[in-house]
Image (tube, rainbow, N blue to C red):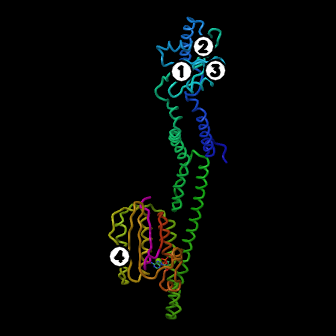
Amino acid sequence: MQWKSTNSLFAKIFAAFWLLIALLISALILLPQLDSRQLQPIKTAGSELILYQSSKLTSLLDKNPLLGSRSILRLLANNNDSDQHTEVFLTDTTGHLINATAPRKIRQFMLDSQSPQKPLQKINTYKTYYGPRLLVHNQHEYLIYISTPNQKKSLELVEWLLDNPLLLIFTGILVTMPICAFFAWHLTLPLRQLRIISTKVARGELDIPFPEIKNSDEFTMLAKSMQLMVRSLKNMLNNQQRLLSDISHELRSPLTRLTLAVAITKKHTGDTKELQRIELEAERMEQMIAEMLNLSQIQLHQAKKEDLALDDFLEDLFLDAQFEANEYSKTFSYPTLSKVSINIYPELAYRAIENIIRNAIKYAKQQISVKIHITPHTITLTISNDGPLIPEKELDNIFRPFYRLNESRERETGGAGLGLSIAENAIFKHGGKIWADNLGNQVSMHLQFPRFN
Ligand SMILES: Nc1ncnc2c1ncn2[C@@H]1O[C@H](COP(=O)(O)OP(=O)(O)OP(=O)(O)O)[C@@H](O)[C@H]1O
Ligand SMILES: [Mg+2]
């Protein structure tokens, strides 16, 4: 775990969760307090209102000093001329209501607010209540409460939200979503960069430059170890390919000497069955070495990809194939080629397709056909031929180097068993796919190229 930097992934995730939870708790505590409809200390306007009513009542009482509580109320009712909407309620100091009736809500308010030292106010849907205020008359103490219609017509946003929990949830989602989305996007940015790189590495692009990941310690470390991994992978591959290519080269000289010795022996002793056999095997070894060199060249291939029109690229290849098939009295058919462009290593793609076509011609009984399927991102060539099918369990094996289905039969037809391996390597270099299947009574080889880089 990396504690050193506040920029580390650990610190960021920790801070984000902690902040979010702290915000939620604060919102839960603060929101109801923002609701002005809560029971709260009386504001100036309310104090003035209750003061006005109480002094009005006091001046009335001063004129009629001997009135009892019931009469006070009657007096009050008769004098409610200008401010008919303001209602006055009286209780004695024990909280006993003096008015004949009072709505349930103000009775509740009277229970909640009983101290004239700390008068409160409460806003309800239509009315606002204030009180109490102490009134002394005729040696009796009264508590005075008033109820006025609400001044504000509409509710404040907070109150409106508190009254509609669904809307409150929706607003919460709306506010937090972009923040969380940005945070998640920001955190995963280096991961996405690394994913792009690892896809390219998987395609064999080992020379790819690594982006500088500055804002996260963990990802920077991951990027560094990936870089190390790619470097050692490159070294290993280079060593292996160099070995393959060196062996092939080294094998060539003794082989040439062997062929020469056979030719000299033939001259001295005449041609024999054994010498013919040695010659044939030497030829095969020669061919194998050539193909092995081919394979190592593909793996070490460093050229750049090019954008080519499909018809320019394939037309000649298919015409040659048609010619070759005719030589063996077989038919090779292909569809009209379109002008769509494809991003490839021309030499590698050419070799891949050529190897597949050569197999198809070799193993076909009569017919070879090509189909091309184009999607916005891929171009798939399907080369099918009649002839012996490939057993299902061998469909993957045939791509292994030196793998041949029928060792003894194919020994006679020649072939090192490297053709499909060469094609597979070339397609992988493009980031494409190659696979075989038996469709109907045909063997089909599918070569899928990505269209763009
Ligand atoms: N179109 C096909 N129909 C039937 N079998 C096939 C077809 N293509 C390949 N195979 C089988 O897969 C094996 C491997 O093919 P691959 O091209 O690698 O080797 P090869 O053709 O024998 O030799 P090379 O291509 O090196 O000259 C072949 O030996 C053959 O048995
Ligand atoms: Mg082949």
Crowd band around label 3 with a 10 angstrom C-alpha radius: few (<14), some (14–19), many (20+): few
Mark with earlier residue (3, 2): 2
State which quarter of the image contains the C terminus: bottom left
Q: Which residue is mark 2?
A: 69
Q: Reading the chain from its start, which is encountered first: label 2 or label 4?
A: 2
> For mark 3, what is the residue?
96
Examine the image and state in which quarter residue 96 appears: top right
Instruction: Count neighbours of disc 4 (C-alpha within 10 A) and say few if under 14, some if 14 to 19, many if 20 or more.
Output: some
State which tag comes first along the sequence, 1 or 4.
Answer: 1
- Residue matched to label 4: 333
In this picture, which residue range is highlighted in magenta? 437-453
Q: Tag on residue 425?
A: none
Whether tag 1 and tag 4 are in contact, CB under 8 A, the answer is: no
Q: CA distance from mark 1 to mark 4?
A: 97 Å
Foreground pick, 328 / 60: 60
Query: Residue at 48% of width from left, 16% of height from top?
Result: 83
Q: CA distance from mark 3 to mark 2?
A: 12 Å
User: Closest to the observer: 116 or 434?
Assistant: 116
Where is mark 1, residue-wise? Answer: 147
Residue 375 lies, with reference to residue 402, above or below; the image says above
Q: Are marks 3 and 4 in contact (CB under 8 Å)?
A: no
Amino acid type, residue under disc 1 in the picture: Ser
